[in-house]
Amino acid sequence: MPSALDAETLDVVLDSLRDFAKQNFPPEVLLDFDARDEMPLDLVHEMCGPELGIQLLFVPEEFGGMGGGAFDVYRCCEALARIDVGVATGLLATFLGSDPIRVGGTHEQQQHWLGRIAEEGLLMAYGATEPEAGSDLAALRTTATPEEQDGEVVAYRLNGRKQWISNGGVAGVTTVLANAPGGPTWFVVEKDTEGFGHERPEDKHGIRLSNTAALTLDDVRVPASHLVGESEGQGLPQALAVFGYTRLMVAAFGIGAGWAALDHAIEYSKERIQ
């Protein structure tokens, strides 16, 4: 779907985003957060609040969003990256985290989790990458052990570690890829679940206004209803489907950041004297 919004509506969304950025992200604020390697979490939450509600563009209409298409997503991601790629990553990591549900979840799961993103501005994370396996998802070591009651699987116990997770230290909910008996499977894990934790944010060379942290899973009990799609072994096809769409966001980040760099360079060239 190239575009789902009419041109006027999309322009209003982008103008509102630019106005918010002008008021809340002047250069000195961005530089201060960058120097402290800190995510402006309150401002990111505010972007997903009633005043702006930027997350609605990415959520289908049936779940309370605006149902933006590929072109709408591209324009929004480009505009966010013009502000700062870290801010853009902090906001849009939610849609990487929620995409396993979007592409593979049951209708009830989609209604619940995507509905919460639309209504609450819920931040999410995508827990796939591991220290030893890197981006080789087929080599993951995190395990999901079924817990049975009266012969029926009622929950899973997750054990393992995830690395370099965007929003890892701030997300309210994380989708976690783990090896169940039936193969790699996605699970939805709430932030405060016992045994689920994160380490201190990574000290990065760039994109420092996003939170990137390792996740630890120590016998984390997840209800069977939180298994994405309620069928084991679908994790890798779901992950591939996710990457096919989110690469559009990453490409838009590059274009938006490039335009911002050019704008800064032009202004500097008007002032610099050789």
Image (cartoon, rainbow, N blue to C red):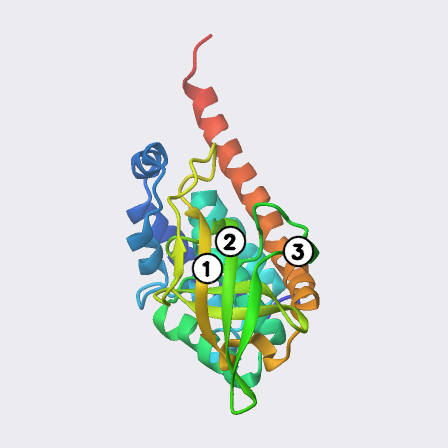
Labels 3, 1: front one:
1
Identity of the residue drawn at 55% across and 46% down: 253
Lower position in the chain sequence, tag 3 or tag 2: 3
The kind of secondary structure element at disc 2 is strand
Q: Earlier in the sequence, mark 3 or mark 1?
A: 3
Q: Quick one: 16 or 44, which is closer to the camera? A: 44
The residue furthest top is 274
Tell me the residue that label 3 is attached to.
137
Q: Residue at x 34, y 33 (%)?
A: 31
- What residue sits right under mark 2 in the picture? 161
Q: Residues within 10 Å of mark 2 (few under 14, many from 20)?
A: many
Amino acid bearing label 1: Leu
| Distance from Cα at disc 2 to Cα at disc 1 | 6 Å
Q: Of the numbered discs in the image, which one, if any, rests on residue 45?
A: none
**Label 3, label 2: how far apart the Cα atoms are:** 13 Å
Position of residue 39 relative to residue 237, above or below, is: above
Q: Examine the rendering and report whether any part of residue 137 can be seen.
A: yes
Residue placed under numbered mark 1 in the picture? 217
Q: Residues within 10 Å of mark 1 (few under 14, many from 20)?
A: many
Q: Position of residue 112 (x, y in %)?
A: 45, 80
CB under 8 Å between discs 2 and 1? yes
x 35%, y 71%: residue: 120
Give the x, y percent position of residue 29. Answer: 30, 38
In the picture shown, does residue 266 fall above or below 87? above
Q: Nearer the viewer, mark 3 or mark 2?
A: 2
**Residue type (three-letter) at the residue carrying disc 2:** Arg
Q: Position of residue 88 (x, y in %)?
A: 46, 50
